[in-house]
Amino acid sequence: MGLKVENATKKFGDFTAVDNLSLVVERGQMYGFLGANGAGKTTTFRMILGLLNQTHGTVTWNGKPITYANSPEIGYLPEERGLYPKMRVEEQLVYLAQLRKMPVAEAKREVHKWLERFEVPHYASKKVEELSKGNQQKIQLIASLIHKPSLLILDEPFSGLDPVNVGMLKSAILDFQKQGATIVFSSHRMDHVEELCDDMSILDRGKVILSGSIRDAKRSFGKHNVRIKMDQDLTGLKEIAGVEAFTKTHDGAVFRIGNESIAQTLLAASMKLGDLRHFSIEEPTLEEIFVAKVGKAHA
Amino acid sequence: MHSFWIIFKQAFLTKARTKSFIATTVIVAASFFLVANLSNIIALFDGGSEDADVLHVLDESGQLTPLLQEQLAAVDSPVQAMPTEMSETELREGISEGTIEAYIELTQAQGLAARYVTESANGMGSGADVEQAVQSMQTVLAADEIGLSQAEVSQLFSPASFEREAVAVSSKSEEELNQARGLVYVLILLIYVAVIYYPNMIAMEVANEKSSRVMEILISSVSPVKHMFAKIAGIGMLGILQMLIFGTAGYFAIKSAGTDLAGGITGVFGFSDLKISTFLFAFLFFLLGYFLYAVLAALLGSLVSRTEDVQQLMLPMMFLVIIASFIAFSGIAMPEATYVTVASYIPFFAPLVMFLRVGMLDIPLWEPLLSIAIMLVTIGVLGTIGARVYRGGVLMYGPSQSLKDIRKAIRLGDNK
């Protein structure tokens, strides 16, 4: 069960914003959605939420189409901060929770519980516009999950926040997942996706160009990085067959190789140059995969 | 239905609690009391200085002053004519210094001559009274000279009897029309203000929710159509409440003004002969007019991305209301004109114009009912289109803000 998107396509006139997208998010999973700006992430979310009707395809949550009837099961944090600037925090959160069919008394309890957790209980009676961006985002996150949704959709939840706030939100989201919620979130920060998600999709111009578990993605990418630290100049080594890219660093260099066996050749060659301080074979980062995949698609 | 009431309550309460709403309500209600009691208040300030109404009379013969007093009394003037011992120079000084309000010099040579002197041309409001009294004096003196008796004089000046009567059974008598006119005028003004003020509030609200992006959260919880209609109903309730407060305040303001005004202003405005049906129609047309324009305003509000752009897009709608008010206000003088009749069936003008006709004329019931039916259909059609535009419009962000966006919004919100 869980969230199932099958062959979803959304066209605006002649423009295809999302092209034949399919994905499955199992219950209780944290799913990452990667894509450059304009790749179709927000349109996909809007289709999942039922704000936009797909041109073709189906979207179901636990086997049922998502409509306003099951809106209490869904939570949403939009990409742009969306709160009433002039309304007080508590009043606002209770109102939004009520719209998702949570009783007032319970909503009030939850508001205070969450404000405590984010160490901002004194904000209950403040207007949203008086809060800093990071604190507004805390309120925004509370608004998306206060009614205890089983499916939580977060569009760029960490953008523009300082590391302390990112850490706080991350741990809250992880805890919420542990309680059984299914979470889909988009980001252009690969490290966040890498850290939080098991599965992910990379979207480019409306198409899924890579999808599945992050581990599989890395393995199938087939490329590794060799990091070498030594004082001698390593530029000559980039001529070795199998080295696909060479990046000079302040204390050595990083080589991208298509085949793990090349690493041995590099090791032997570098040891001939002088004293080796550091040698390591690293997995590709998600960022490299993203740049390689999306870059290729654009070429 | 549950969420409908939550949004309804929210729309109503947040607006009703704002300082601007409370202040507007209090100020307008207070101004009713102020206007109704204006003459009492003015009297309060004038009360101390009775001199204000004293008119010094320079009359060498000494014969004319009693005659002037008599004629002033005949026209119910508050002016007290007093013979003076002062010279003209002293009187002039008195006027400049403000101790004397006015004086008059009366001489009788070839007929009566009078010179009325005040500080400025608009100094003494009772100048007209004095002039009338002097004119009457002249008549009396002239009659006296010719040797006419008092009875002959009054015969000479007795007015002809002039009565108006309309043949049509339905038409109201001139007297009734005059009575209705004031009330209808005030109520049209209220409807006019209401169909501008509250729909504007809705457009601002919608644009606000859109620009603060809270809209996306709202419509992911509740359908946009439900959101739109709950909002319209909530603000509508606010309008009804405010109008009720104004109505009650107006009623008590007139009551508080005492018998003098109740007979004066209320007589002029026709409040003494309160017609329940006029008020019922006013309420009905207020509601229909509100819904008609509110749906339009919500539609327009959903198209803009910034609240600054609301007014620009609302302009065509404002023109409709303003044209309706022109027709209605000009129609007060001639409610039977053809253009008024025609306009009363055009849905955007009907709330003002049909109300004018119902209030001023005895038209058969089917006419307002037909007009109401036309309005209901229009509201239905606009509601359907509005809901479609709204659905897409609230998701649409961009710099443009023209009516062309309606098509784009419908396409975005459409099911297929």
Image (cartoon, coloured by chain):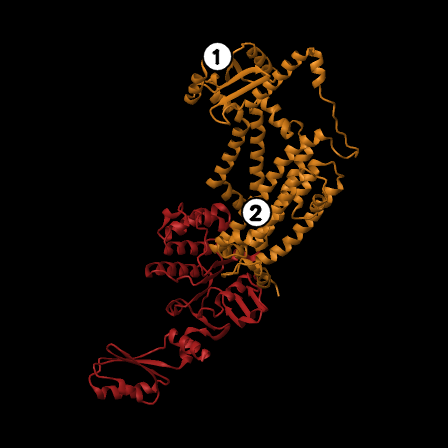
Residue B304 percent location from the top left of the image? 52, 56
Question: Is residue B30 something one can see in this rendering?
Answer: yes
Q: Name the one closer to the observer, B253 or B343.
A: B343
The image's mark for residue B84 is 1
Front in this rendered view, residue B36 or A267: B36
Disc 2 designates what residue? B199
Residue B306, percent across and down? 48, 55
- The chain under label 1 reads B
What is the secondary structure assignment of the residue under circle 2? helix
Image coords of residue B391 (percent x, y)? 57, 58
Looking at the rendered structure, whether the residues under marks 2 and 1 are on a common chain is answered as yes
User: Which amino acid type is marked by label 1?
Assistant: Thr
Label 1 Cα neighbours within 10 Å, binned few <14 / some 14-19 / many ≥20: some
Mark 2 or mark 1, whichever is nearer to me: 1
Residue A46, relative to residue A288: is it above or below? Answer: above
Q: Colour of chain B?
A: orange
In the rendered image, what is the letter of the chain coloured red? A
